[in-house]
Image (cartoon, rainbow, N blue to C red):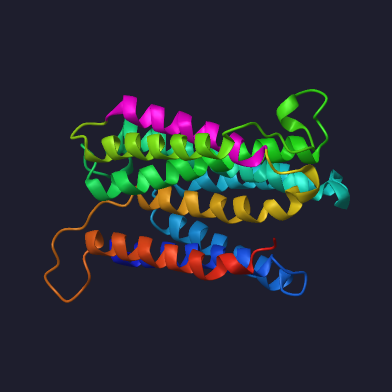
Amino acid sequence: MSANQLALWYLAASVLFIFALKGLSSPVSARRGNLFGVIGMAIAVLVTLAVTKKVAFILVAAAMGGMIGAFVARRVQMTQMPELVAAMHSLVGMAAVLIAIAVVNNPSAFGVHDPLPKGNKLELFIGTFVGAITFSGSVIAFGKLAGLGKAFRLFSSAPVTFPGQHWLNLALALVMIGFGTVFFLAPDKAWSAFAVMTAIAFVLGVLIIIPIGGADMPTSECMPATSSGICVIWTRRATIPPTKPPTSMAMPMNSMRPRAIKATVQMIAINIPAMPK
């Protein structure tokens, strides 16, 4: 399978995750949205297996995780389903961050050129900060849904607000993007910029979720539901080596990256109005 085909399959999976978000915004279309999510994840998993040499390790890990997930899901009551979903989203976000760290640490192990090409760095930046925000935000959502406010103030079901909160979020987001830009432009690995960017993203995930009350958390979980899939897709895309200049009419991998980003952003913009208020 060529790198262009990989990019198209991963882009298709990303679009299906966004359609899943739109479907889950209404009880009428929830089943259809859930089906889109299942199809998107199936595409991502099958494509990953198709380009992986040591499939046995992945299948064993998937079987173990599937058995644990099935066991936990069967023991959870329907009224506790939102917090179970939040917990699973947090694991997906952390998986994306750990994969990104592994790629930055040893790109050659993933078949990527060392030092990292600019396109791969951009995708690592997107996957890492979305994954970190998803992880910490989903942890706070789980605490709010589980009623752990007495154990920790940030888990309170009541909105946690303070003066200048939105300005602080904006400032942190700009600083995070700044360090991400340093990581993107640096000729080497730029571990310091990458680490600071990741740490700020973890903090942002907390600050974005704490103002939301516990009663609104099941609705707010729609966004982590999609972002968890998107962060894994973009992190996985970062492990695709850039292709050599094409000798035919095939589109080069480097030119597909900005098109894929643009298409994903457009799909999000189209579907955001359908989210529940």
Rendered residue at 66%/44% (across/down): 88
Q: Is residue 34 above or below residue 101?
A: below
Quarter of the image for residue 136 reads top right
Q: Nearer the viewer, residue 11 or 263?
A: 263
Q: Nearer the viewer, residue 31 or 150?
A: 150
Outermost residue, front side = 163
Q: Is residue 163 above or below residue 20?
A: above
The magenta-colored residue range is 190-210
Q: Nearer the viewer, residue 276 or 41?
A: 276
Can you give x and y, in whole percent of width and height, for residue 224 in the image? 61, 50
Can you give x and y, in whole percent of width and height, for residue 9 in the image? 42, 66
Rendered residue at 55%/48% (across/down): 59
Q: Is residue 244 above or below residue 192?
A: below
Quarter of the image for residue 203 reads top right
Answer yes or no: is residue 86 visible. Answer: yes
- Say left or right for 43 vs 30: left
Magenta span: predominant SS is helix
Rendered residue at 21%/58% (across/down): 243
Quarter of the image for residue 18 reads bottom right
